[in-house]
Image: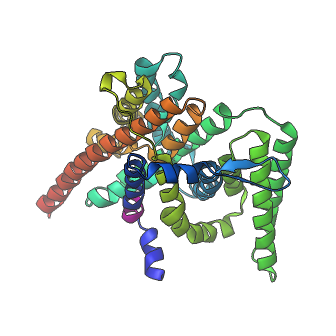
Amino acid sequence: MADSRNLLRTQQFPAVLLLLAAALGLVLANTPAFGPIDAVLGFHIAVPGTSINLSVAHWISDGLLAIFFFVVAMELQYELTRGELNSFRKALQPSIAAAGGVLVPIIIYLIVAGGEQTSSGWPIPTATDIAFALGVLAVFGKGLPSAVRVFLLALAILDDIIGIIFIAVLFAHDLNWLYLLLAIVGVVVFGALSRMLPTTHSWLVVVAMVIVGVLVWGLMISSGIHATIAGVLLGLAIAQSPAMPTRHALEPWVNGAILPIFAFAAAFVVIPAVSPSELSPAFFGIAIALPVGKIIGITVFGWLAMRIGSKDKAPALTITDLLAAGALGGIGFTVSLLLANLAFADDPAVRDQAILGVLVGSLIALVLSGVVVSWRAAWYRRSTTTVS
């Protein structure tokens, strides 16, 4: 049991599991199994005494994924206070690169799919899947300098922040300010409770935190803000001392169950039986903007960022290192799939093609990054051998 938990905490295995889950969802959606599985995903479950009545698919994307964002937010809190983004100097260069990795994909998407029906999908290709990116780096990047991983980690975390802002701001609807205020009060109470740990009655505090966390989630979804934001706020509010043990405990469940289930459900779309010319512009916009936009934006803006600072100091990364980071940044996957569901929630046909665009674009970026990272790592290994 301990070995399986440790395996789920590695960078390689969860990425493979995520890919297999998405592939399984896509395959089964295009077989006779579609009907029964679609019926299960569409089955509604209500919370008695509340207005919350969600399909199984929405319980996955709004409920389970809130736990994923809770874990992400705890990591964000650590990086912003103690890690790679805890000072302006550390955050400046990856912030500039992240800006390029957001702006260029948006521009490419709008050029390809800026029509009235599909323009709302512009946030989709802005995300980077940190688990996938670090997994590919771990598999193919043996020999790369640690600066590449640090840069990629900071870049992906900043991408997560941008994605969270997009979800909170762009996809809020029919705001209920009372519920939102009560949710924020709940977040404050949750943070206060976490600062009581450890105590002689820690289990009582933990139970209270779980109850408050569930209430915050319910209030957030009732307020019109996407429920995953509840996970973000709770993860940022929790005290640092219990945050890391909590993240460590939840990580195997997130990697081994929550993300694969979400990937399966999100990728459960029927491939349209049409010619490529009949596909939605959203499909092409995302499939191109993810790999191409990310690699251009991160590489160019990252190169400019490396020139900021002391002129007598050599840049930490070369242009080819940035090329590798840019290719890895094009693996959008988890957050891009969520954004695709949100951006085209009212148009299932376009939504399904947008999801296919995320899968295709992320797969292209995955293959491209594997090649570029392997080539760059081999160069570093040869250089080390030559010097030795």
Q: Which residues are magenta?
A: 11-15
User: What x and y, as percent, mark residue 201?
Assistant: 81, 81
* 135, above or below 203, in the image: above
User: What x and y, as percent, mark residue 57?
Assistant: 59, 49
Residue furthest to the top: 115
Q: Is residue 155 among what the camera can see?
A: yes
* 230, above or below 247, in the image: above
User: What x and y, as percent, mark residue 132?
Assistant: 40, 53
Residue furthest to the right: 178
The image quarter containing residue 382 is: bottom left
Residue at 74% across, 45% down: 221
Q: Is residue 342 left or right of residue 183?
A: left
Dominant SS of magenta comes to helix
* 58, above or below 252, in the image: above
Residue at 79% across, 41% down: 223
User: What x and y, as percent, mark residue 22?
Assistant: 41, 52
